[in-house]
Amino acid sequence: MKPFLILQLRGNDLAAQDEFDAFLKYGKLSTDEVVRVRMEGDDLPEVTLDDYSGIIVGGGPWNVSDADEKKTDKQHEAEAWLSALLDRIMQADHPYLGACYGFGMAATFRGATVSKERYAEGVEATTIHLRPEAQEDPLLQGIPEVFPAFAGHKESCQDLPEDAVWLASSEACPYHMFRWGQNVYATQFHPELDIPVIRNRIDIYKNAGYFPPEEAEPLKELASKQEITVPMEILRRFVEKYRR
């Protein structure tokens, strides 16, 4: 089969490995079915879309909406590279699943405003509501209309990207999932994030401005009481649908 290309941007090795392992676990993928690129450190390759079944972009500490002077040279390089790749992805309507940062990049590329003005969510479970359009979407048919998912983002999409199909929202953040074309998907929530991984992320990012550091232990305890399964089913369906 043609592999999936997994793009990451987590400079912390534990956080990056946790995310990668979760993509494999819940996507039902083996290591020989993926190509992994850590955009924050690796050389950025020339990508031939037809070599890949699909492209998955994860989240991380970068913010699309940060001022240019706050971004590192590597972030500038990676965002220019990913924007050029998104141009080709969307021209070809090539399978893409962007989560968190991958959501923000896709939304920005389609002309939406991504900023910290409104709709941020803390590092915790949020209740996702599927919109009526989701019932017609091949990836979401039969998915529960309401389900919990882990989120945690400083920036959010302020308006729906041009020509996008609005698929899901939460009470705090209206734009949690959209589809552009037939095969380009983006989720603000994390489709790979389970309890052990979010507990690790809370420790890793407790000084990164997502929450006061003293709230780390209560947040971990709260996360441990959640039962999160539906987001992983969406990830599994994406891989199953586009595996070639």
Image: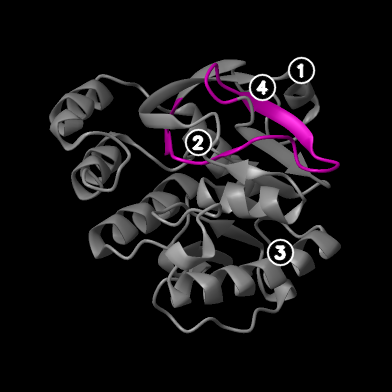
2 over 228 or under it: above or below: below
**Does the magenta-highlighted stretch encompass residue 166?**
yes
The segment highlighted magenta reads 149-173
Above or below 236: residue 93: below
Q: Nearer the viewer, mark 1 or mark 4?
A: 1
Mark 3 in CB contact with mark 1 (< 8 angstroms) = no
Rendered location of residue 145, percent (x, y): 62, 16
Q: CA distance from mark 3 to mark 4?
A: 29 Å
Is the residue under label 1 in contact with that under label 2 (CB below 8 Å)? no
Which residue matches tag 1? 132
Identify the residue at image location x=52%, y=39%. 116
| Amino acid at dot 3 | Leu
- For marks 1 and 4, the one nearer the N-term is 1
Residue 151, position as x, y percentages in the image: 43, 33
Three-letter amino acid code of the residue under disc 1: Pro
Residue under pointer 3: 86
Viewed as shown, does residue 218 lie left or right of 15? left
Q: Between marks 3 and 1, how big is the CA–CA gap? A: 27 Å
Q: Which residue is mark 2?
A: 189
Position in image of residue 55 (x %, y %)? 61, 61
Mark toward the start of the polypeptide (3 vs 4): 3
* Circle number at residue 142: 4
Q: Who comes first in sequence, dot 3 or dot 1?
A: 3
The structure's colour scheme is one colour
> Taking 56 as reference, is 121 left or right?
left
Taking the image as shown, residue 107 lies to the left or right of residue 26, namely right
